[in-house]
Structure formats: structure tokens, C-alpha cells
Amino acid sequence: MLSKLPPIVDPRAMVSSGTVDDAGVYRLSDDTALVVTLDFFTPIVDDARDYGRIAAANSLSDVYAMGGTPLVALNIVCFPDGELPLSVMAEMLLGGDEKVVEAGALVLGGHSVSDRELKFGLAVVGTVNPNRIVSNADAKPGDVLVLTKPVGVGVLATALKEGELPPEGVAVITELMATLNRAASEAMLSAGASAATDVTGFGLVGHASELADASGVTLEIAVLDVPLIEGALSAIEKGLAPGGLFSNQHYYTAFVESRTRADGRTVELMYDPQTSGGLLVALPEGSLSAFDDALSARGGESWVIGRVVERGDRAVVLT
């Protein structure tokens, strides 16, 4: 359906829907462009304040993935009037505001509608230097692939819904999802990253495939080097997998060649839908140390999970 929309040809639109990138970029001047995005979703944890923090971190992530700095945000709320007390909305909004303030931005307002299902997120506007945009379309053969958060949120959130995730597990995934990608974004900018995307609902393989197609390259991902959240593998072995995992696998398998010796359950986690996942960054191998140093100085961590090669028959090769 989206293919029926008219193409955007205005030169001020530096990044639009054509590359399936994380956010749109609109040039204001030679040294300033706006980064614009929005995202919202249903609750993934039970605590309203934590839900707000996670939703805000997730929405801000698209600006960070482009190398931008968030400026302002607007709340987007769908709320079941009469079914939940307004105190739930208040806690949710407070959690969101907490993360926006942490990002150095401001919540200027928002809009709410009555809905049978609770949903929350943000529309976010940031800025970026037009000459320093990090899109998903510039990965180059020879680049290394770095991931800044482990995967497995989808299966562990499913375990939570089924009452199979202990409190310490809930705490781990909550803090992981609520962690801003600010440090990773600043590190990739300082290291001169070629391309990046954040890993969210389409899973690692899905977002890697989009980056590969936009850049005209193939990404080789070493499955056994991909970090997994503790408990994710045992959860999927128990059958605690979200429907989105299988939807991702069904769609993206056609774009993937598998050469890996990893077991089937571990491979399935490569398709696990993430909420507020980390950044997948392509950067020159010679810049890896600079990236690691910059990220460590900001309290972050990362894992080298593969490399970029010349375009082959498939967008992604699992090794």
C-alpha cells in the first residue's frame, strides 16, 4: 500500500520513506536539519511508570539512530476511559517525561483519544548536522558490524505475560528497554560510523536486511557472537515466543542465507522482535577502537557480530 504514495522529490527532504530509515530528515539550512519520528505501542510491562520510560526511550531511539539530538516531544496516548484510573495515565506520562528530560529534551504537550486498548508513545523532533547524518544506506564492504544491546526482549516479555519470568528477569529487561541509545549514538558519531539502525520490531535480521538493501551490500552476522539476554534461550526452548518472531521469520527468511552451526532456537532469536533495542552500527574496522573507547567512557557496551561484504544473492548471511 505504501508504494502507492507519491515519491518525495523535494530537495529539503534529505531522508524519507524511500530507504525505510529510522526517521525522516528535513534540511533547514546548510548546517541544521530536523530529525522527525513517532512511535507508540501497547504495554510491555505491568508497571505504568516503567511502561512510560520504555515507550519514551523507544521513541527517542529513532533520532539517536540517525545521529541526531532530541529537542522536543509530544505525547501520543490511547486510553481506555472508565476501565483504568487516570492515575495510570499520570504515572505513564511521568515515566515518559523522565526519559525525555534525561535525553536533554522537553515534552511540550500531546494528544489523547479514548481507546479500548492502552497505547503510549511520542512524536519526537531533533536536530542533526546535514553533513553528519547516519542513515541506514551507507554501509560499505569492509565495515564491521557492532550491536549495542543484547537481544531476547520479545521472548522474555512473552514469558512475563505468561507468569514465567522471575522478578529479577523483569528488572533486567525493564532497565535494558528503558536505557537510552544516547551513548551509542554519540560514540558512533565520534568514531565516524558509516551506517546505523536501531533494532526493534523486525528483529535483528529484519533491520539488518533493511540496512543491507538500502546500502546495496550484504551483512554477514555470526550468530554465536550475537549477545543474548540471560534467560532468552531457555524461554524460547519452552515455547515462550511472541507471534512477531514467527511473522518476522516467515517474511525475512527469503532474504537470508544460513551457513551457521548454531542450533535452531538460537537462530530463531535473530528474528525476535525487540522493544527499544540497541543500535546496529556499521563502521570502518580501523574506527572500532575509537568507538569502543567512546562508548565505554559513556557507560555503554557493545559486541562485534559480523561484517559488511559486497552484495551477494541475499541481504543477510547467518554464519
Image (spheres, rainbow, N blue to C red):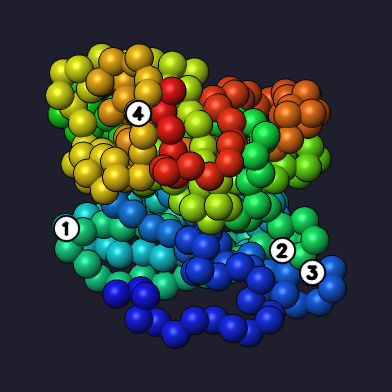
Residue at 16% from the left image edge and 18% from the top image edge? 238
CB of mark 2 within 8 Å of CB of mark 3? Answer: yes
Residue at 32% from the left image edge and 35% from the top image edge? 272
- Kindly state the secondary structure of the residue where label 4 is placed: strand
Find residue 181 and report its horizontal and vertical position in percent. 60, 41
Front label number (1 vs 3): 3
Find residue 175 and report its horizontal and vertical position in percent. 47, 30
Query: What is the CA distance from the residue labelled 1 to the residue labelled 4?
Result: 47 Å
Front label number (4 vs 3): 4
Residue 265 lies, with reference to residue 142, above or below; the image says: above
Query: Which numbered disc, 2 or 1, marks the residue that appears first in the sequence?
Result: 1
- Residue marked by disc 2: 127
Residue at 59% from the left image edge and 83% from the top image edge? 9
Query: What is the three-letter code of the residue carrying label 1?
Result: Glu
- Residue marked by disc 1: 83
Query: Which numbered disc, 1 or 4, marks the residue that appears first in the sequence?
Result: 1
Residue 102 is at least partly visible in this image: no
Residue 240 lies, with reference to residue 84, above or below; the image says: above
Quarter of the image that includes the C terminus: top left
Residue 161 horizontal side relative to residue 94, left or right: left
Query: What is the three-letter code of the residue carrying label 3?
Result: Thr
CB of mark 4 within 8 Å of CB of mark 3? Answer: no
Find residue 203 and report its horizontal and vertical position in percent. 38, 40
Query: What is the three-letter code of the residue carrying label 2?
Result: Thr
- Residue marked by disc 3: 32
- Residue marked by disc 4: 258
Query: What is the CA distance from the residue labelled 2 to the residue labelled 4?
Result: 39 Å
